[in-house]
Image (spheres, grey):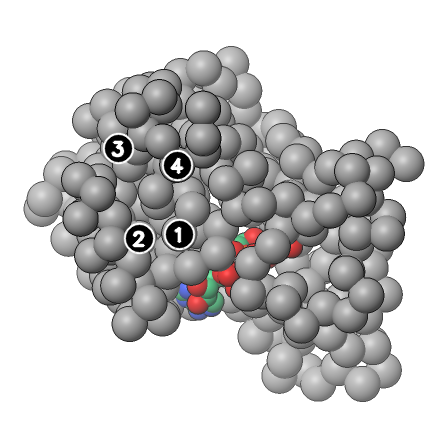
């Protein structure tokens, strides 16, 4: 089975409404394709409007139910408007993938307070604002799943990535706490912990990034992460909440 052959895909998400932040490219675009292949109605949101619109057009041409809408995850007003839009159209949300993220490489000594704060705003506060805004719609799902994209630089330190690693470590604490707060509402919350993934985010990384420390000696494809997201989103993961799903080619096993 090829990862893009949707005739051979399981169909675990029929009728589910899925929202993916950072959905214009990279892992978010792959998640949009995979969740739609499994039967979900997907809304991809991002600040890269041209790429997001083109992606939705491409996937629609493949008979996949993917639409695009602008959303900056740091803007509470935009989250509120998106909540109202989804409430009008679907009246519920089943899957929220907080995937949007940015990276900036700098030593602690050279980092500016503005850049530090911006990384935390996008990577960490973006997920908080997203979940907070969507809780009323997730409560209406009956099988809601929230997936927060952390990183191997969350559980481990990474010189040169202080703001990024701090945001990704913060997401782990946020996910666990959200899982505990929302379990009674039937909302599962898990963290995805990717190792190196081939996307535009790390295209400029020198010397292959974490490949030398990765036992499988390569980066993941975005589709390899999408398989994990589809699992967490589906009822196959119905007893998983507050967990971290590590997909890192063995990086953390060392
Ligand atoms: N690529 C890797 O090696 C790797 C490893 C571990 C974790 N991650 C995480 O995976 C997630 C996806 O990253 P990717 O690798 O696909 O990179 P990417 O740069 O291709 O995708 C990130 C997306 O987030 C969007 N985004 C940035 N700021 C935004 C904002 N304010 N509002 C809405 N969208 C915004 C970008 O426009 C982009 O489309 C990120 O959270 C990243 O930190 C990536």
Q: Is residue 157 left or right of residue 178?
A: right
**Residue 190 horizontal/vertical position (percent):** 54, 33
Looking at the image, is mark 3 or mark 4 nearer the viewer?
4
Nearest the eye: 4 or 18: 4
- How far apart are labels 2 and 3 at the CA level? 12 Å
Is the distance from the Cβ of mark 1 to the nearest ligand 1 atom less than 8 Å? yes
Q: Is residue 55 left or right of residue 234?
A: left
Within 10 Å of disc 3 (Cα), the crowding (few <14, some 14-19, many 20+) is many
Question: Measuring 9% from the left and 46% from the top, which residue is drawn there?
Answer: 88
Q: Are marks 1 and 2 in contact (CB under 8 Å)?
A: yes
Q: Which residue is mark 1?
A: 29
Q: Are marks 3 and 1 in contact (CB under 8 Å)?
A: no
- How far apart are labels 1 and 2 at the CA level? 8 Å
Q: In this rendering, does residue 142 appear at all?
A: yes
Looking at the image, is mark 2 or mark 4 nearer the viewer?
4
Q: Which residue is mark 4?
A: 4
- How far apart are labels 3 and 1 at the CA level? 14 Å
């Amino acid at each position: 089975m090829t990862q893009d052959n949707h005739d051979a895909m399981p169909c675990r998400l029929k009728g589910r409404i899925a929202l993916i932040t950072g959905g214009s490219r990279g892992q978010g675009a792959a998640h949009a394709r995979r969740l739609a292949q499994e039967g979900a109605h997907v809304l991809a949101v991002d600040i890269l409007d041209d790429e997001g619109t083109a992606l939705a057009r491409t996937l629609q041409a493949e008979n996949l139910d993917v639409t695009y809408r602008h959303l900056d995850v740091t803007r509470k007003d935009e989250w509120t408007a998106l909540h109202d839009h989804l409430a009008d159209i679907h009246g519920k949300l089943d899957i929220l993938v907080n995937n949007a993220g940015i990276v900036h490489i700098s030593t602690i000594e050279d980092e500016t307070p503005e850049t530090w704060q911006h990384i935390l705003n996008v990577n960490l506060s973006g997920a908080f604002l997203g979940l907070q805004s969507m809780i009323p719609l997730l409560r209406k799902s009956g099988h809601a799943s929230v997936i927060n994209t952390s990183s191997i630089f969350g559980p481990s330190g990474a010189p040169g990535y202080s703001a990024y690693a701090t945001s990704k470590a913060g997401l782990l604490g946020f996910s666990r706490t959200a899982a505990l707060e929302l379990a009674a509402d039937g909302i599962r919350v898990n963290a995805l912990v990717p190792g190196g993934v081939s996307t535009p985010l790390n295209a400029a990384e020198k010397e292959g990034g974490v490949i030398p420390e990765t036992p499988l000696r390569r980066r993941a494809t975005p589709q390899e992460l999408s398989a994990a997201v589809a699992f967490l989103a589906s009822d196959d993961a119905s007893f998983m909440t507050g967990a971290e799903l590590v997909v890192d080619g063995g990086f953390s096993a060392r």
